[in-house]
Image: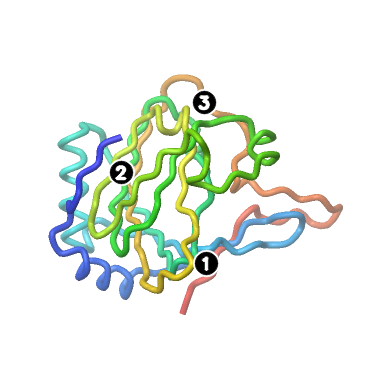
Amino acid sequence: MDVVEEFVREPLGALVEIEAGAPWQQTEVLRYDRYVPERRLGAWLRPETSTLLRQTGLHLEATYRVPLDGVAALLYRDGNDFQGLHSDRELRWLEDTRIAIVALGPRRPFVFRPRGSWAQAAAERVPAGAGPDDIVLTPGEGDLLVMGGACQRDWLHGVPAMPGIERPRVSLTWRWTSRRGRPDTAATYYDGRQFSDGTPRPPTRSRPVI
């Protein structure tokens, strides 16, 4: 894990610009034959539309010497929006990855927890950040985090809810995988699960946020 504090020189202006201009979508995930909305909004951004996105991408490629495509943006509208503990398993190849995150907006816990069995995690029900081996960072206000492959292979990460925070937070993410090593072939959160005999439905769906 690399951390660069105050990587963005004018984080408030960048936050306002991206929050107002991004094509935000509400993603819904199929769970037990009904769609459940994620507790945050998302958007794909083109690097050439923003000086911040373009220059950050060039910096990351020069520093880590890997190609990065596009930018995924997440909007946490307030402290009630969150992202549960997970690893980015949709990349499939997790051992050699680079995932860079620029956090704009208020500082919030970013929790790392050693990967264990899902059965154990469900049984313990330990809140993110309260586990005995949890590592808690508090990025925000333009900080940059870069996770290497060990973060995805051996750890979970997430942004827990923080009721009481009213300001929005935007997370900008660049990702790369070498597609080498042993692929993770287990189903991901976004593969959906259908339990009826009805017509199969897509595992996720998105709708624009007006």
Residue holding disc 3: 183
Residue holding disc 2: 100
Query: Secondary structure beneath disc 3?
Result: loop
Q: Earlier in the sequence, mark 2 or mark 1?
A: 1
- Tags 3 and 1 in contact by the CB under 8 Å rule? no
For the point 41% across and 22% down, the residue is: 180
In this picture, residue 116 sits left or right of residue 41: right
Kindly identify the amino acid type of the residue bearing the numbered disc 3.
Answer: Pro
Looking at the rendered structure, which numbered label has been put on residue 26?
Answer: 1
Instruction: Where is residue 74? Give x, y as percent.
Output: 40, 59
| Image position of 180 with respect to 79: above or below | above
Residues at marks 2 and 3, CA–CA distance in whole angstroms: 21 Å
Closest to the camera, between mark 2 and mark 3, is 2
Query: Secondary structure beneath disc 1?
Result: strand
Tag 1: Cα neighbours inside 10 Å, few (<14), some, or many (≥20)? some
Q: Residue furthest bottom?
A: 210
Q: Earlier in the sequence, mark 3 or mark 1?
A: 1
Which of the two residues, 95 or 116, is positioned nearer the viewer here? Answer: 116
Q: Residue furthest left?
A: 9
Instruction: Where is residue 161? Give x, y as percent.
Output: 49, 60
